[in-house]
Image (cartoon, rainbow, N blue to C red):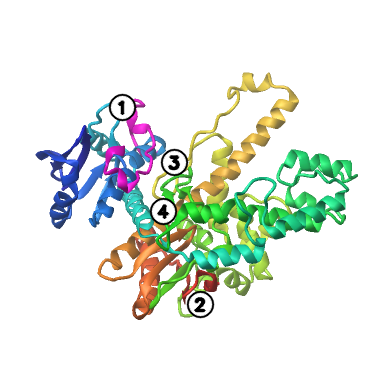
Amino acid sequence: MHIVLSAAGARVRAETLDDALRTVETVELDRAALPDWAWERERDRPRWTWDATSAWYPPLLAAGVRVERAHDLRLARAILRHAPAARLDAPADDWDRPAHAADPDDALFALDAPVPLDAAEELRRQRAAVEAGDDAARLGFLLTVESVGSLVAAELQHAGIPWSRERHDAILRERLGDPPGPFDAATRPARMEQLLAELRAALGDPEANPDSPVELVKSLQRAGIRVSSTRKWELERIEHPVIAPLLAYKRMARLLSANGWHWLDEWVRDGRFHPVYVVGGVVTGRWAASGGGALQLPREVRGAVVADPGWRLVVADAAQLEPRVLAAMSGDAAMARAGQDADGRPHDMYQGMVASGAVETRSQAKYGMLGAIYGGTTGESARVLPRIRRAFPRAMALVEEAARAGERGESVRTWLGRGSPARTAGPSSPDAAESLTEAEQRRRQSDARAWGRFTRNFVVQGTAAEWAMCWMGAVRRRLRDHRAELVFFLHDELVVHAPAEEAEEVAAVLRESAAEAGRLMFGAAPVQFALSVAIVESYADAK
């Protein structure tokens, strides 16, 4: 059963559909009445269907209403637009417009659209597109997984991760010095002011401005230092007294800008950091963050993430996720065995590659796999890649075929069917290609190889993102009757805030959910998904 919600001015239209998507009942409600009505209907375990979870769900959460299942029509439309296995022929319209997160205090007024949208009809279009495709089961599962991810993202934002303002302030003072008054270019924290004086003296330039890359390059060049940019890798190659204070200043400036006192005032309230995630914000399906920088949280401030008294943080990190996903996708038994110990339990895959004789060191295994997945063609990756190909031919064949498809301008798909975006190619006919100059042909070949590196990575990274959402969904379901709750997601890592007495049980839930995610994605594929799990009071102690 679906309950399809649509905004209707100051009211909400709720249309109940049966499993065949036939309308059973339609009611209209005042927006203020929706949470109580939804709480009553949730007992029937409907699949709530709406234009965007990020708009509808936060106000329900703020009213104390959690839902088990949903279908996010905008996220599904975005997938179906590019999925090779779908047959969505609908012209571009307002359903293709991405959703924006709503403030829970807006009480659903963010749901008004320029024109009324028929959500039930869009659901029928989407189902028809999936069923007309060549892999309805997988693609339908992907839409379900994406919608589960949207529920998790809203719940993570609602819960927030415990954050100590006092510890954060102490970290900033330790690294940057005492804070200034109202911040501007002339009032930096104390240690930054000291470094500024040092680097200006080393350059002999009392006006040097390290906060402006353009002005800094000019100052460096006037001092006889040949640079074209202020990138770290370029500066590190230079021997000059200014380099050490300059690099230290740049590190401090990044911390101040990304997670300084202004960030603390804006993003931490009532002892919680409430990040805003964007589900499917990257073309591979990985999440992005639209506020707070949740996915770029530096290690320097993790000491401010502290469990409540009597509680613990249970931090789980998926080890070597992308190589394990590649082994499962390709059915490479040798690679799967490298990720297991003698008893079939998950262990360090890179060390397993060494034990198998594929490579000599763990470092070679790591760089070889990164080269295979990301298309590395230089350095250690290039040197060890031939040995990786010989040891794990099926896995390497999968990513190399994805690369060749990308070079040909073809779309590739993840395990569940998310499609890569189209490449804008140059002239495709033989006659047109012959008309290109030699320089244009080289540029075209270079562009094709670059796109091949993208599609090589797309199939693995996108499938890893699907596994991560299955993992989160399984954890969410298993924690339903616990006081513990998911509070943070960072790439391949989950953080659960749990009462101390539940912490060990939660650690087991995280491990069991990882195994379940593997089964949901890959069936009986003999790949073990290893987790590193830590029970800590501070996030900084997790690694």
Location of residue 527 (image quadrant): bottom left
Q: Examine the structure image and report whether residue 95 is included in the region drawn in magenta.
A: yes
- Residue 114, numbered label: 1
- Separation (CA) of disc 1 from disc 2: 58 Å
Q: Examine the structure image and report whether residue 290 is included in the region drawn in magenta.
A: no
User: Which is more foreground, mark 1 or mark 2?
Assistant: 1
The C terminus sits in image quarter: bottom right
x and y percentages locating residue 209 in the rendered image: 76, 44
> Secondary structure under badge 4?
helix
> Secondary structure under badge 2?
loop
Range of magenta residues: 84-110
* Residues tagged 2 and 4 counted as in contact (Cβ below 8 A): no
- 143 sits left or right of 17 in the view: right
Which is more N-terminal, label 3 or label 1?
Answer: 1
**Residue drawn at x 15%, y 46% as measured from the top left:** 33
Q: Amino acid at mark 1?
A: Pro
> Secondary structure under badge 1?
loop
| Viewer-nearest residue: 478 or 35 | 35
Q: Amino acid at mark 4?
A: Glu
Which is more N-terminal, label 4 or label 2?
Answer: 2
Instruction: Please name the residue that numbered disc 4 is placed on.
Output: 466
Which is more N-terminal, label 1 or label 4?
Answer: 1
Instruction: Please name the residue that numbered disc 3 is placed on.
Output: 419
**Badge 3: how crowded within 10 Å, few (<14), some, or many (20+)?**
many
User: Which is more foreground, mark 3 or mark 4?
Assistant: 4
- Residue 42, numbered label: none
* Residues tagged 1 and 3 counted as in contact (Cβ below 8 A): no
- Separation (CA) of disc 4 from disc 1: 32 Å
Instruction: Please name the residue that numbered disc 2 is placed on.
Output: 341
x and y percentages locating residue 213 in the rendered image: 73, 42
Q: Is residue 319 visible?
A: no
Q: Amino acid at mark 3?
A: Gly
